[in-house]
Amino acid sequence: MKYKSFVVFGLGKFGQAVADKLLEIGAEVMVVDNDPVVIESYSRKATKAIIAELTDTEAIKALGIGNIECAVVSMGMNLEASLMCTMVAKENGVKWVVAKAGNERMGSVLEKVGADEVIYPESESGIRTARNLIASNFLEYFEVSADVCLVEMKPKEKWVGKTLKELNLRKKYGINVVAVKDGVVNEYVDPDVPLEKDIPLIMLIHKKNLSKLDKHIIL
């Protein structure tokens, strides 16, 4: 997993899309907003759900986000709140700050105050952002259904030189390798042929098992 702990500032459409996707995949997520109704809706599913005024520097500092690895600042049109959350997050040691900007000028300002990444999204981009934060080693990601996805990734280092029969990915981790991509997609996957380092695998996997592709490096 690229990052394991997150704070999402602002629970508008984009913020909720990011928070929901991160929670779905099993990440630790703190959500912060000034709307008590929205916070109440996340109180049972988020790691922490806190009401705070996001233009108040002291209120943001009081959240105790120093141990959080990634912050998502999602107030796209509220420059003051976005600036305060971005600056405090970086000052408190958050490794990576992703900030939503309503326009390029706002994005430029956010970069100057410390944002590591600026995006210009709505809910669909929020979902893509969450996927990228969770799974840095995926080359492609496609949803097949509400529960199942198709991912493309290169074999992990410890998989290289072993066969699918030896690895037994389906039984151990619920991964079903459906094709290999050696220049073209080859739907026939010989379970007795050792995996090669630079030949990606295309796999069907239940979403609840996604994090295992990052956590279990040694099989």
Image (tube, rainbow, N blue to C red):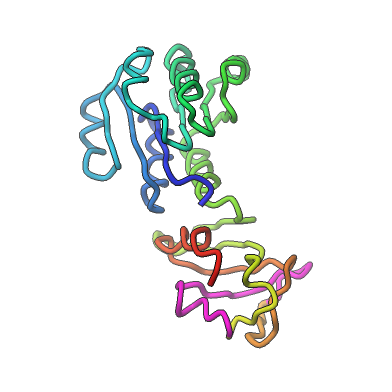
Q: Is residue 34 left or right of residue 106?
A: left
User: On the image, which quarter does residue 13 sit in?
Assistant: top left
Residue depicted at x 42% and y 16% = 81
Residue in the foreground of this view, choosing between 102 and 64 = 64
Residue at image point 52% right, 30% down: 97
The image shows residue 31, relative to residue 151, as above or below, that is above
Say which of 78 and 217 sits in front. Answer: 217
27 on left or right of 100: left
Q: Where residue 148 sits: x, y (%)?
A: 44, 64
Nearest the viewer among 88 and 12 is: 88
Q: Residue furthest right?
A: 183
Residue in the image at 29% along x and 42% along y: 46
Task: Pinpoint residue 136: horizontal percent, then vertical percent.
Answer: 58, 50
Magenta residues span 166-186
Question: How many marks can you see?
Answer: 0
Q: Is residue 95 magenta?
A: no
Name the spot of residue 33 as percent of width and height, x first. 31, 25
**Residue at left offset 42%, top offset 36%:** 68
On the rendered structure, is 161 left or right of 74? right
Quadrant location of residue 115? top right
